Structure formats: structure tokens, C-alpha cells
Amino acid sequence: MRGHQTDKLPVFIIHPVKRQTASPTTQQRARTPERCLDEACGLAGAIDLEIVKAQCVPLATVRPGTLFGKGKVESLVEEIKASHAQLVVMDCALTPIQQRNLERAWDVKVLDRTALILEIFGDRARTKEGRLQVELAHLDYQRSRLVRSWTHLERQRGGVGFLGGPGETQIESDRRILLQKITRLKRQLENVKRTRTLHRSARRQVPYPVIALVGYTNAGKSTLFNRLTEADVHAEDLLFATLDPTMRRLELPSGAQAILSDTVGFISELPTELVAAFGATLEEVLEADVIVHVRDIADPDTEAQERDVLSILDQLGIGAGEEVSQERHMVIALNKADQIDETARLRWQQVPDCHTHLISALTGEGVETLLSDLDDLVSSQRRTVSLSLLQGETQGVAMAWLYDHGQVQERLEDEDGVIHLRIALTPPDIGRFEKRFGSGLIKPPGTLAQTG
Ligand SMILES: Nc1nc2c(ncn2[C@@H]2O[C@H](COP(=O)(O)OP(=O)(O)O)[C@@H](O)[C@H]2O)c(=O)[nH]1
Ligand SMILES: [Mg+2]
């Protein structure tokens, strides 16, 4: 749940660093512990958590009970207390037993990586399908943990039958209830999916083009989002106040209006059981007119990340080869240009595509060029909208203006002299029209109002 800025929960993030066990045959990605920690911080920042401390902690051998050894657990108590954190995020997988023991030892709530990601997805999923998808992933997570503690108990008891009592029955019935819930959810999900296309068109509530930022966690999406929208004086508009905080109005240089949408980042080594739920958080991307792929080119892993992003977009059906009803554009923002050296800069600048921009969301370099590219892409496409013009002195002028600038598809005049139009206009013209004749006139295309 999104609280007030001041309500942020203080969190302590720990990335346990295991000793390298990589075999030479497996081509593992060289991700340094610091990068992993950065990513975990990026994830925590995606929901209302205030990071009070974040550190890598060496992990010599994994203890089944507490993950870390006794000494480490104890020395961390002091650090956690001093930081006033109310939550510890362990950037790894924890067994239920480890989680419970650490919570006891540290006297704070402990989440593991999967649970943190589930929190974020739950926070971001907007549609019914998205929420069901995330709930399903959550139940699956719970179930796997129940099963694990069950086998653990079984092993502990060494197969002695007479101890079989409330413990086992409880777990058995918990399991059954979970399974029932999962089956029910899956059925609901199927139903929702069947009517998905319907929902999607109904979601086009706003007559503006949508620009979605995608990319890995920490690529700089939110920084770019803020930079692009910070100067916007319309941010408090009623229409946008009702939208999600991850969507904001963006006024482009030509005067065209667009909606900029920030998304949950791609996550490296996303637990496989969360892939479907992740897709659910990307729904707005399916609706986007322009997708801006934000890449962190200062990350040594940037190429592999790019491949991941493109392949997931493909799986979502918004890859390059997809047939889409409306033309969709892909713009690439090569971010963190301030962090690369001259040689790398020269190399990146040779990318021939005119929709690829070397930028720094932090310093603002290249952002203007990016904006005008977005402007061109968005402005060249006419959008069908509907509007009604009341009888009065401006009606004639407005009509003349509209016939001049747009393509009228349908016209209807009711007995009160109100003229209802369905018309295709470019976004800059929508902006101009609203400035001149009043805002709130332009509506999403629907059936033309029949007054009675
Ligand atoms: N040096 C540099 N750092 C950046 C730039 N853009 C973002 N960052 C930093 O990268 C980190 C992640 O940025 P954020 O916008 O939260 O990434 P997101 O996870 O994609 O939303 C933050 O510490 C930003 O300050 C940039 O252009 N240059
Ligand atoms: Mg972000």
C-alpha cells in the first residue's frame, strides 16, 4: 500500500555473499556483490521502503537454522538496532525456518528476495488479471514453504508414527486449503484472460498517447521519469491525480500531451515462479504507443540485460515482429552516459538508429533530443477522439478549426444544437484545441452521445 512519504518503513538490506563456487563450464554472469546489492536497493525503493542501511555480508557456510553462523547473527543484531530498521530484507532465498529464526534473533520482520519481489508486484498490478496473477504466485510461494517445512518435520521425526498429531494435520489441512485456493484462482484467471481483449480496450480511458519506460531495475527509469515530468505544471490535474503515481502527464515541446508510465524494472535472476506475475505488472506496456527501453550502459552486464528485456517483450507479444493494431515504436535510451569513458562513448555514438539516444538522466545530457524524438513519434499519429460542442458563439469557430486540422469521421447534431463529433487529431492538435477552446472537451472515442 502506498502511504505518505513520511510513513516509509525503515529497512536494512543484506546481500549475503557466498564463496565463489562457479564451475568453469557454467557461463555465469559476472555480477559483483555490490551490483547485486544495488539492485536489491533499487527493488526496495520501488515500494515504500526507506533504506537506512545496505551491506554485503560474507557467508562462509550456509547454516540450515539461521543461514549465517552464530557470531554473525549476533553482530548483526547490534547493527540492525543502531539503524532503527523495522524490516530486514535478505537478498537471497530463505527457508521458513531460517526466516523465523532470524526474526526471533533480530526482533524485526525479515523478508527474503522472493517475498520482496512479490510485494512489489502486488503493489503494481492494476488490472484484475494482474492481481490474480500475483495472488497466484503468492500462494505458490506459501505452498512451497509449507511443503518444505513438512518434509523437514518428517525428517526430524525419523518416521516415528506415534508422534503424528496436530502438527501434521495442521500442515496437511493448510496445504489442502491452499490447493483449493490455487485451483479457484486458476479458474478465475482463465475467465479473465478470455475477456482480456475487452478489458484492454476499455482501459483506454485517456485520449493521450502512452509512453512506457521499461528496462532493468537500476537502469535509471525512475530518475528519467522524474526528470521528464518535473517541470510539468499540470501534475496536479484531477485526471492525473486519479491515475497511479507511476503515471504522469508529459507535455512535449510541440504542446502534445502524453502519459508517461514508469514500470517495475526487470529483475536479474527472477525466480521462475514469478515470471507470469512479472508480466502482469507490465500491462500498461501492452497499451503503450511508444516504449522507451532504458539501458544502463555503465553496467558491464548491459548486453545480456538488453537480450533479456527484448526476449521478455517478445514473450509478452510486443516484440519487433508482432502484428499490432496500432503502430508501436521503440526508442532506446542509453543511460548513464556520464559514467562511461571517451572510448566507450565513441563506440555508443556509432549506433546508427535514429531512435537511439545517449543520455544521462542524472545530468540531463541528451534528454532534450530524446524528448523531441518522442514528440515526433507521438505527434505524427492521429488519434480518434470524440467531443461535443455546445451551441454558442465559439461553436462555428471551433468547428472550422476542427475541419481544418483533423479528419472528421462522424458528426451528429442533437435537438439542443449540440454538435457531437468523432474525429482523428494529432496529439499536438488535441493540445492546441484544448488550450484554445477549453479543456475537458476531448473524450476517448465512444459512441456519440445521443441526448434524449
Ligand atoms: N551516474 C548516473 N546515475 C544514474 C543515472 N540515472 C540513474 N542513476 C542512478 O541509478 C540508480 C537507479 O536509478 P533509478 O532511477 O531508481 O532506476 P530504476 O530502477 O530503473 O527506476 C540511482 O542511484 C540513480 O541515481 C545517470 O544517468 N547517471
Ligand atoms: Mg524505478
Image (cartoon, grey):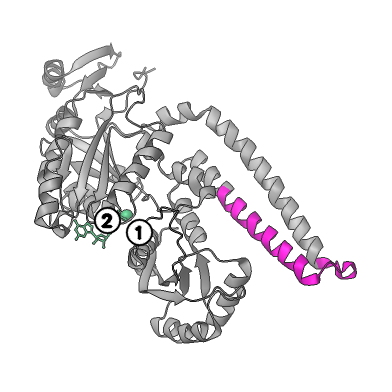
Identify the image quadrant of residue 173: bottom right
Residue type of the residue flagged with mark 1 = Ala
Residue 215 appears in view: no
| In the image, residue 140 lies in the stretch drawn in magenta | yes
Residue 310 location, x and y as percent? 34, 39
Residue 3 location, x and y as percent? 40, 62
The chief SS type of the magenta part is helix
> Disc 1 to disc 2, how far (Cα)?
8 Å
212 vs 165: above or below:
above
Q: Which residue lies at the image location 55% right of the left edge and 28% below the top edge? A: 194
Report if the CB atoms under discs 1 and 2 are less than 8 Å apart.
yes
Magenta residues, start to end: 137-166
Residue 317 location, x and y as percent? 41, 31
Residue 157 location, x and y as percent? 80, 71
Depth check: give the residue in front, 203 or 193: 193
> Under tag 2, what secondary structure?
loop
Residue type of the residue flagged with mark 2 = Pro
Residue 197 appears in view: yes
Depth check: give the residue in front, 439 or 225: 225
Q: Which residue is mark 2?
A: 300
Pointer 1 local density, CA inside 10 Å: few below 14, some 14–19, many at least 20: few
Q: Which residue is mark 1?
A: 30
Dot 1 or dot 2, earlier in sequence: 1
Depth check: give the residue in front, 351 or 404: 351
